Image (spheres, rainbow, N blue to C red):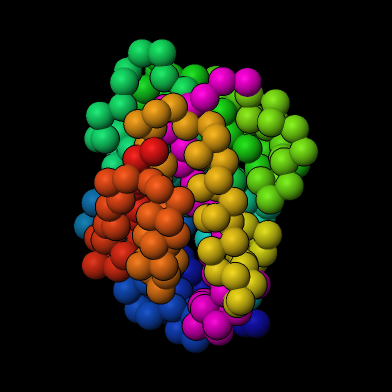
Amino acid sequence: MLLCAMETVKDVFAECRAQLKALYDAQEADAIALTVLKEITGQSSAYLKAFPEYQLPIEGQGKMKEVLQELSTGKPLQYILGHTEFYGLPFKVNPSVLIPRPETEELVEWVLSSGLPKDNINILDIGTGSGCIAISLKKNIPQANVWAIDISADALKTAKENAALNDVEVYFVKGDILNLTDNSQLATHNYNSIISNPPYVTPTDKILMHTNVTDFEPHTALFVPQDDPLLFYKAIADIAIEKLVKGGLLFFEINESYGSETVEMLRAKLFKSIELRKEMSGRDRMIKAVL
């Protein structure tokens, strides 16, 4: 692919729009361009917008071309840069983990505002991926003991790096929540809260998804069978029944198409005070339940 010269900020915005128009609309392309420009130049968003004729150094122009070539394949920007931000904290990301998303920040905010005790508290994050939920909770509730489980050794490696990056202690455990052979994998005590953003994308959903998700993000963290879309939710609810303290809180990020079904599943398992919550764009994406 032949790229035009990208000597100035204005050139970069124009070229990103042109080269990425098959993948992103103009607004998204501009946001991507701005993020990369900040990374390359070290300048603020305000500066880059105010001075469109600002000239990139030669090495910056070369880096911009390299990034744009990768973006044109559909590879997510966060994987190209190797990092992102979540709940105001830095996180390393790579194709072994899902890219943290704004709706998951809303889930973390809900957990933090739910009235959990600040002392002698145990929290479990199931399917931790990058560790974004567990690490953000530990950062904001320093007295909490936080455990995080994932089936992927590569994901856990990244999560451990992120815990070190954010200077928090989280206890990471490798395990398959669909086949826990030993409850000691989840520690020998109970939890005040269990949080999970498990796989929930069905084959039907996949058809409607952007290829930069389906082609690049880890499938084990995304997909469930069409005939059993609540597979992980049912397993996690059963774990919660056993491992939550009385009155403990279970939080899920959910597939918007199965909100009522997830509520009914939890009700059938005798959870109480079940609340289905919409995220910022108005979609049913979160559930809280009390044991």
Q: Is residue 144 above or below residue 181?
A: above
Image quadrant where residue 34 sits: bottom left
Residue under the point 55% across and 45% down: 238
Image coordinates of residue 87 in percent, x first then y, are 36, 40
Q: Is residue 92 left or right of residue 267?
A: right
Residue under the point 34% across and 40% down: 290
Q: Is residue 208 magenta?
A: yes
Report whether residue 22 is seen: yes
Of the pair 168 and 119, the residue shown nearer to us:
119
Image quadrant where residue 89 sits: top left
Of the pair 183 and 14, the residue shown nearer to us:
183
Residue under the point 30% across and 50% down: 274
Give the total number of marks visible in the rendering. 0
Q: Is residue 228 above or below residue 107?
A: below
Image quadrant where residue 86 sits: top left
Q: Is residue 96 above or below residue 131?
A: below
Q: Is residue 46 magenta?
A: no
Q: Quadrant of the C terminus?
A: top left
Span colored in magenta? 188-215
Q: Is residue 98 left or right of residue 290?
A: right
Of the pair 146 and 269, the residue shown nearer to us:
269
Q: Is residue 57 above or below residue 32?
A: above
Image coordinates of residue 286 in percent, x first then y, are 35, 55
Residue under the point 68% across and 38% down: 156
Q: Quadrant of the N terminus?
A: bottom right
Image coordinates of residue 183 in percent, x first then y, are 69, 31
Report whether residue 105 is seen: no
Image coordinates of residue 206 in percent, x first then y, are 56, 78
